[in-house]
Amino acid sequence: MRLSARVDYALRAVAELASVTAEAGPGRSRPVTADQIARAQEIPPKFLESILLQLRRGGIVQAQRGPEGGYWLARPAGEISLAEVIRVIDGPLAHVRGQRPEELGYHGAARALQEVWIALRASEREILELVTVADVAGGTLPGRVVELAADPRAWT
């Protein structure tokens, strides 16, 4: 799986917003400026601005202009999966040469590749829909993710 810099930065930005919301307490949220997010996560500010715009259009964050302005999560962090953020930024999870795996037409000896790509997408989706922004921000990943990451073969 290859994630773009946009996706990496978007995930880091929403985790930062979730962290600030968690610090403020249940039901409270204070706007966080793009500059604050950029500094905390070492994200180029201009690049982050365009990512935050995409996240706002995708319903992940809300924004307010002005001296008291900034960004905050549109929903509780526990309701926003990593898969949702990735789809907002980069579109569908798995593509082969720009096509969805079910649209590919393999023949002969390569016919089974289509099922491999579909299984791969299902596996990615299983993990990315399981993990929420709250899990990442809180450092409390689901057991299945911890188990997979604990396998030394996962790191090579």
Image: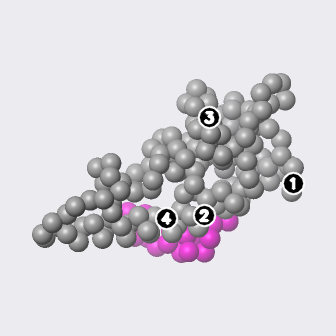
Q: Amino acid at mark 4?
A: Arg
Report whether 16 appears left or right of 28: left
Q: Secondary structure at mark 3?
A: helix
Circle 4 sits on which residue?
A: 125
Q: For the residue carrying disc 4, how many other residues have a C-alpha within 10 Å: few (<14), some (14-19), or many (20+)?
A: some
Q: Position of residue 39 (x, y in %)?
A: 66, 34
- Tell me where residue 76 sits by quadrant: bottom right
Residue pictured at 35% horizontal, 56% vertical: 100
Circle 2 sits on which residue?
A: 131
As drawn, the label of residue 53 is 3
Circle 1 sits on which residue?
A: 27
Q: CA distance from mark 3 to mark 4?
A: 24 Å
In depth, the one of 107 and 86 nearer the eye is 107
Give whichever of discs 3 and 1 has the lower sequence position.
1
Residue pictured at 52% horizontal, 44% vertical: 89
Q: Secondary structure at mark 2?
A: loop
Q: Amino acid at mark 1?
A: Gly
Give whichever of discs 3 and 2 has the lower sequence position.
3
Labelled pair 3, 1 in contact (Cβ < 8 Å): no
In depth, the one of 150 and 10 nearer the eye is 10
Report whether 148 appears left or right of 60: left
Q: Amino acid at mark 3?
A: Leu
Q: CA distance from mark 3 to mark 2?
A: 23 Å
Residue pictured at 38% horizontal, 63% vertical: 156
Q: On screen, 155 above or below 49? A: below
Query: What secondary structure is the magenta-colored segment mainly?
Result: helix
Q: CA distance from mark 4 to mark 2?
A: 10 Å
Q: Is residue 87 magenta?
A: no
Residue extent of the magenta highlight = 140-156
In depth, the one of 39 and 65 nearer the eye is 65
Q: CA distance from mark 3 to mark 1?
A: 24 Å
Q: Secondary structure at mark 1?
A: loop
